[in-house]
Image (cartoon, helix red, strand yellow):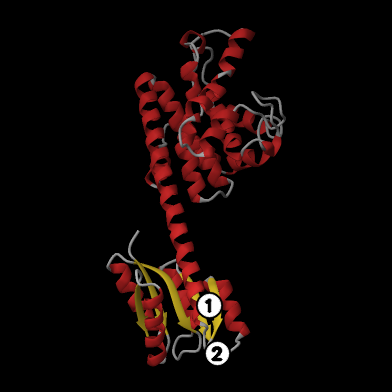
Amino acid sequence: MGDRCIVCVDDEAIITMSLKRELQMGFPAIRVESAISGPEALEVMDDIIAAGGAVAVLVTDERMPGMAGHILLREARKRVPGVYGILLTGYTDVEALAEAVNEAGLFRYIHKPWDRTDLAMAVGRALDLYDREREVADLHLRVEQLNLAIVSALENSAHEDDPDTYGHVQRVACYSGLLARGLGQSESDCRRLFLYAPLHDIGKSGIPHMILSKPGSLSVEEFDIVKRHVSIGARLLKSMEVDTMAKDLILYHHERWDGKGYMAELSGEAIPLSARIVSLADVLDAMLCERPYKRPIPFDQVSEEILSMAGSRFDPAIVKAFEANIDSFRQVAAGNMRSAYAEFRDNA
């Protein structure tokens, strides 16, 4: 986090000097810069940012020639989305205030001549909120970096232990990212799902290999053992600071839309969206690939089967997203997943 700065702006130099001096006295640990116009204030902000500083609070007059205060606040937030804006004015301009609130994220509106205590409290509160938001952002970044490290380590382990499983989780990752995008999810959520989808069957590391590789049908007892992989996977991540999305898709990706899945027997939208998406992606790849107990099924046949399970096994909206982007899934299934995989991975 760069050094915090306050920028104060008024077209009357004597007021600017008075405002700057007052803020310097009230916040001696904070750098205070000033400007006498909107364009000059933006230049000052650019210089602060270029020097590695951070503009935390912008205090500006509203009625200024060339660029009004609410316009300055709007332009300032384009440069520094997290800046807190405080508008000073001797007039009651309802339209300007509305625009400042709606478009520029105005934090406080104070009448001129301002009350020193009121201004100091407003700036102090803005600085506290700015610091808190930066701390939360830093925490989120550290958690995401930890998540990525965990996912990468687990993927590498899967690659070494079972190359076929590694190929499966790569394809499931691509399918999941494509489905999320088809549903209109944010790029951030598409990326997160792509990153965490490979963990969906991590609990199978606790299932005997002789059961997982059995060429024939599983007995009821053996299938009950296989079912445990979802709870085993959830326990593996229980003590780790892993995103809730990862835990959800591990624990619930074998639930069904109609409530006939396992282990919690959730139905409909009670199943987390990430798990609903990975459920379809996992089944799609499992049907397409050769297994010890079955031969691969052609893509067109698998597609028809997926479409037929809308509303029973799968969320109808997710099936619709699959159908609308079926050519992309066909490409990944054919082994041409480099572009899709690189796109999601490079955005991570």
Identify which amino acid the numbered label 2 is placed on. Gly
Q: Residue at x 49, y 81 (%)?
A: 116
Of tags 1 and 2, the one toward the viewer is 1
Numbered disc 2: secondary structure: loop
Q: CA distance from mark 1 to mark 2?
A: 15 Å
In the displayed structure, 186 sits above or below 240; it is: below
Nearest the eye: 163 or 334: 163
Residue 97 appears at what percent x and percent y? 58, 80
Asked where in the image residue 109 lies, by quadrant, the reply is: bottom right
User: Which of the two residues, 40 or 89, is positioned nearer the viewer here?
Assistant: 89
The quadrant of the rendering that contains the C terminus is top left
**Three-letter amino acid code of the residue under disc 1:** Asp
| Res. 163 mark | none
Q: Residue furthest left?
A: 51
- Residue at the disc numbered 1: 118
Q: Residue at x 44, y 69 (%)?
A: 78
Closer-to-camera residue (248/253): 248
Q: In terms of image quadrants, where is residue 163?
A: top left
Does the image show residue 125? yes
Query: In front: 322, or 105?
Result: 105
Q: Is residue 158 above or below residue 338?
A: above
Q: Which numbered disc, 1 or 2, marks the residue that appears first in the sequence? A: 2
- How far from the left and from the top, in percent, is residue 287? 55, 24
Image height of 37 relative to 73, above or below: below
* The label number, if any, that marks residue 90 in the structure image: 2
Give me the residue at 52% from left, 83% from top. Answer: 115
Question: Judging from the image, what secondary structure is the residue with disc 1 in?
Answer: helix
Q: Position of residue 8 (x, y in %)?
A: 41, 80
Q: Is residue 218 visible?
A: no
Q: Position of residue 140 (x, y in %)?
A: 44, 48
Local crowd size for mark 1, using a 10 Å CA cut-off: few (<14), some (14–19), many (≥20): few
146 relative position to 235: left or right = left
